[in-house]
Image (tube, rainbow, N blue to C red):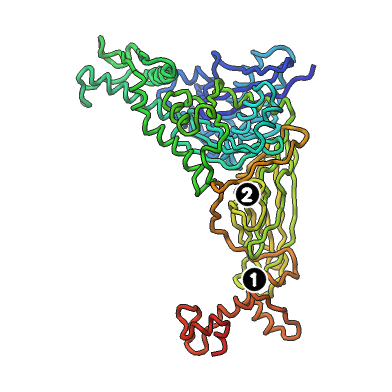
Amino acid sequence: MVQQIVGIDFGTTNSLISVVTHDGKVKSYAERNRPHPSVIRYETDKVICGQKAKDQLEHLGVGVLDNTVRGPKKLLNKDAINVGGRLLHPTAVVSDFMKYLKDHALSEQQENEADLTKAVVTIPVDLDGKGRIVLREAMLNAGIYVERFVHEPLAALYGYFKDLENTEDELRRNEGRMILVFDWGGGTLDLTLCQILNGAIVQIQNKGNNTVGGDYLDEAILSFVEKTHAKQHGWTVDSALQRYPGMRGKLLADCEKAKINLSNKEKANIFVPEYFQGSGEEAEIDVWLTREDLEQICSKLISKGIREIEHLLSPQQTNIDSQTISLCLATGGMINMPSIKQQLAEIFGPTVLHISSKGDRIISEGAARIAADELELSLAKPFELLEARNSVVTLWPEGTTLPGRGYSIATKQSMYSTDPRDGKALIAFKRPLMVGKSGTSDARVTYGNMSVPINAAFPPFGERILVEAIIDDNLIVHVSAVGCDEGEMVKMEFYELEFALRILKKNIKENTFRLTEKHKFTPGVAALSNISRSKNAWDLVPGELLQEYNESHPLNPKQLTEQQRLEHLRYQPCARCGAKWVKNCCNVSLLQNDARHSH
C-alpha cells in the first residue's frame, strides 16, 4: 500500500504534522491531543523540543531566551542565533525541531500510514525568499523533501471545504463569491481575501500583523495576575517578593490555560504554589480571573486586530463591502475568545461567520489534503512588465502552473529603451489588483522597480535590454536584466506572488460574479517605464525627444503622433516670455489654440 505524503504546519507558536490515512480520514500527530509548541531547548548535548521545552520557559516571548528558542520561524532571516553562548544557524535550529516532529510522528503512525520523507509545507503569505530557502534546507537536513510550499490561508480554506459533505458541490455553490480567511494565532494575525473562480481558490489580497498574536495576551494576563496578587497583600514595588526561578514560565502556562477555559466558562482559577520566595499565602498565586477581566485586559489588542479587517477591505486596499463576503473562516487559538467571536459576528453576521472547531490543526490538515489530492498551485494574477506609456507585457498569464520540487519555469524578453537620455532603462514589474483584470486602465500593485544601466549616447531603440525571469520551487521570482552595450547586469527577487489552488479538474460554468459600484478600485501612482518590446514602436518615444531625433536625422524623420506633437510643444519655451507652462505664459489663448510656438 502506497504511503501518503504528509502536510506540515510549521507555526510560530505551535507546529503539527498531519496525513490523510488510507480510509480517507485525516490524522494529526499531536502531543497530548494538542499541536507541538514550537520550542527548542539546548542543554549541553541534549536537544529538548515541544511541550517539555516550553514547560521550562521563564518568558513566553518569541525569540532566543538563554538556551531556549521559541518561535524559530521568526528567526529564519538571521545569519546566526546565539543560544546559551552557542552560535547556531537558523537552519540547524529548525532542523532539530523538525527531526523531533518527524520522530514523534514515526512513533505514532501505523504501518505504511505516512511517507514522512515528503511533505507539503505551509508558509505565511509574507515569508520572504531567504526564509523559504532556509526552511527548505532545514527540512532536507531533517530528512524531509518539501514537495510544495503553500500559503497557510489556502491550506486552511481547502481543509474547510474538504470537511464538508460534498466538496465539489460546495465549490460550485460558492462560485464567484468572496471569502475571508481570518487566522489569529499565538504569533501573528493573517488575513487573506479569496474568491472561488472556475473551481479554484484564488487569492485576492493578503494582510498580516505580527504584533497582536495571542502570546502578547498571555503576557498581559500574567501582568494582571501579578498586580492583583500584589494588591491583595498590599505590596508596593519595593516590598514585592522575588519569584522562584522557573515559576514565571509555570504561571504563563496557567494564564494560557485560563484564557482557553474562559471561552466557555465565566471564571477560571489561576493557582501556582511557591511562586514567590516567601511563606504562607504571600508566596502562592491564587487569583480568580473572570471573563469580564479577560475582556478588559485584551480589549485594546483585540480592537487592533479587528481593525485589520477594515484596513484590508478599505478603499486604499480592495474597497470591498463586508456585506459581500459570503464566508469568514476564522481559525487559530485566539478566535475562541467570546469578544472576538462577537465582533466578527457583528461585522459579517452569524450566518457568514464560521469559527473552525479545529483552528489549531486545520492548516496542517489542509496541507495533508492538498498532498493526498496531488493539487497544483497556479498564479492567481498575471506577472507583468510595464512598457512605456503604461502598456503592459505579460510575462506569465494568470493560471500558469507553478513548479514543484526540483523544477522552475522561465521566460525571456528583448526590450529597447525609448528614452535613454538618463542612461537608465526603467523596468516596473506589476500585477493587477483584482483577479480577472488585465486591461491597461485596471489598478495595479507594484512588485518592484528595476533600473538597468544603458548607454545614454544611443538614440531611442538603439540598445537592446535582455530581461529574464524565473520562478523556482520556492515560489520566488528571480529577475535579471542587462543592457547589451553597457553589459552591467541587475538582479531582483520577488516573493509576494498570489496563488490559486486548482481543485476541480474540469472548469465549471463561467464566472457570473460582477463587480458592483462598491467594488470600484482607486489605482495607485505607477512608475513610468521607458522600454518597449518593439523597435518600431516610435509612438512610445517622448515627443520632445523624438523631435530632437528628427532634427539630427533629417533624412529619416519619424512622424509624430498628436500626443507626441503636444508633448513637444509643452516643453518648448515661449519665444516672447520664455515660460514653459500655460499658467506662466504671456499669451494663454494662443497656447490653448496650439499656436504658442508662433508668437
Name the residue at the top extreme: 280
Task: Kindly identify which numbered label has been placed on residue 295.
Answer: none
Q: In the rendered image, is residue 581 in sight?
A: yes
221 left or right of 479?
A: left
Q: Is residue 410 left or right of residue 341?
A: right
Nearer to me, 464 or 364: 364
For this rendering, which residue is in front, 268 or 253?
268
- Name the spot of residue 324 as percent of width and height, x first: 55, 38
- Secondary element type, mark 1: loop
**Residue 19 found in image quarter:** top right
Residue nearer the viewer, 110 or 574: 574
Residue at image position (71%, 28%) is 168
Q: Amino acid at mark 1?
A: Pro
Please report contact status of discs 2 and 1: CB closer than 8 Å, yes or no: no
Residue drawn at (57%, 89%), measured in percent from left and top? 598
Q: From the viewer's perspective, is 528 left or right of 464?
A: left
- In the image, what residue type sits under mark 2? Glu
Can residue 138 be seen in the rendering of this structure?
no
N-term mark: 2 or 1: 1
Q: Which residue is mark 2?
A: 493
Where is residue 559? Give x, y as percent.
71, 79
**Quadrant the N terminus occupies:** top right
Q: Residue at x 44, y 27 (%)?
A: 342
Name the residue that disc number 1 marks. 420
Question: In the image, is residue 479 above or below residue 300?
Answer: below
Residue 477 vertical placement versus 210 (above, below)? below
Using the rendered view, name the quadrant where residue 178 is placed: top right
Distance between the Cα atoms at labels 2 and 1?
25 Å
